[in-house]
Image: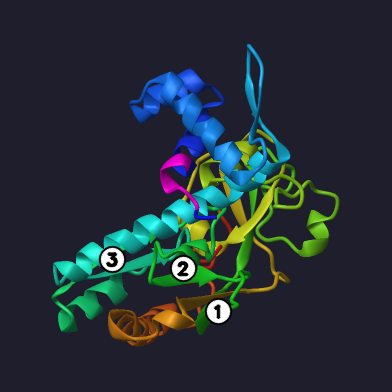
Amino acid sequence: MDLDLRKLRYFVAVAEHRHFGRAAQALFIAQPVLSRQIRAFEQELGCPLFTRSTRSVELTAAGKKLYDEASRITTVVDVALRRVHEARRGEQRLVVAFSSGLHVSDAIREFTVSNPNVEIDVLPLPWSERDAPLRDGRAHVGYLRRPFDDSGLRTVPIGHETKVACLPVAHPLAGRSALTSADLDGEPILDVRARRTFSLDEKFELIASGQGIALIPASIAHSYSRPDLVYLTVTDGLPVETCLAVPETNCSGPAADFLDIATAVLRRDSGDGDSPSEEEPGAASVVPALSAD
């Protein structure tokens, strides 16, 4: 069967609002029309997507699975349509994604010198996303930290940076000049296994409120200084690799030109960033390597 994208968007609205009336308002259609479209969609798929009661609307198991896929599907379609219109207008556009704390401005400036007709957009990657925008078409090139799924991607190593421990200022270890991994034994670590967070602000608020500590790339520590947090070098911590990545299907044109230029510029700027820098107030020799996640 063919997937009706209009009905899929209606489904997403109901799934997000958990209410037919509010979803209809957001879509600027009448509630009875929305209800009929969702029922027709369920009949086409051959399974219920929602369980309905007088008080609530909840996703079924099938509905939850479809909702997980829906954002990716609609994003791919939207990106494809945008690129069709750009091609019709003769426009060239390059979207560069980058992980928190990593900086691509020097590479973009140098690329623009030799490619003045290419429009550049940047896409900051949320804490919870790594390679997804390269796969769904939102970005052409990514400046990322490992680990991420590199299947189907061409990756070019750029450098390394150390991780630092992020602690609240009142933590018993906060007065140290540096730490080892052994010092952190028994400490609650806020990582994806213990507690998934969806932004740096959320993670830092949890740390500052005493909910745990985190190991973060040094460049993020430089970019997100807070008076209620302390960043300490972990002397025996493993470095994090930074790299550029492009889809293997997009290794030509502006993306390929940017990859070549950015590789040289970012490697030069990085210096493989593992040498200590000047200490910042309240932090112990945080390494300013090019950031990663």
The quarter in which the N terminus is drawn is bottom right
Give the side of residue 155 with respect to residue 57, left or right.
Answer: left
The residue positioned 50% from the left and 49% from the top of the image is 71
Q: What range is drawn magenta here?
A: 3-7
What is the x, y in percent for residue 26? Answer: 38, 27
Query: Magenta residues: mostly which secondary structure?
Result: helix
Q: Which callout, 3 or 2, points to the residue nearer the camera? A: 3
Which residue bears the numbered disc 2?
134
Which residue bears the numbered disc 1?
152
The quarter in which the C terminus is drawn is bottom right
What is the x, y in percent for residue 127? Answer: 54, 53
Residue 83: numbered disc: 3
Q: Amino acid at mark 3?
A: Arg
Q: Nearer the viewer, residue 290 or 285?
A: 290
The local crowd at label 3, few if under 14, some if 14 to 19, many if 20 or more residues have their Cα within 10 Å, is some
The answer for how far apart the CA atoms under marks 2 and 1 are is 10 Å
Give the side of residue 32 with respect to residue 160, left or right.
Answer: left
Residue 129 visible? The answer is yes
The residue positioned 69% from the left and 64% from the top of the image is 234
The residue positioned 84% from the left and 55% from the top of the image is 185
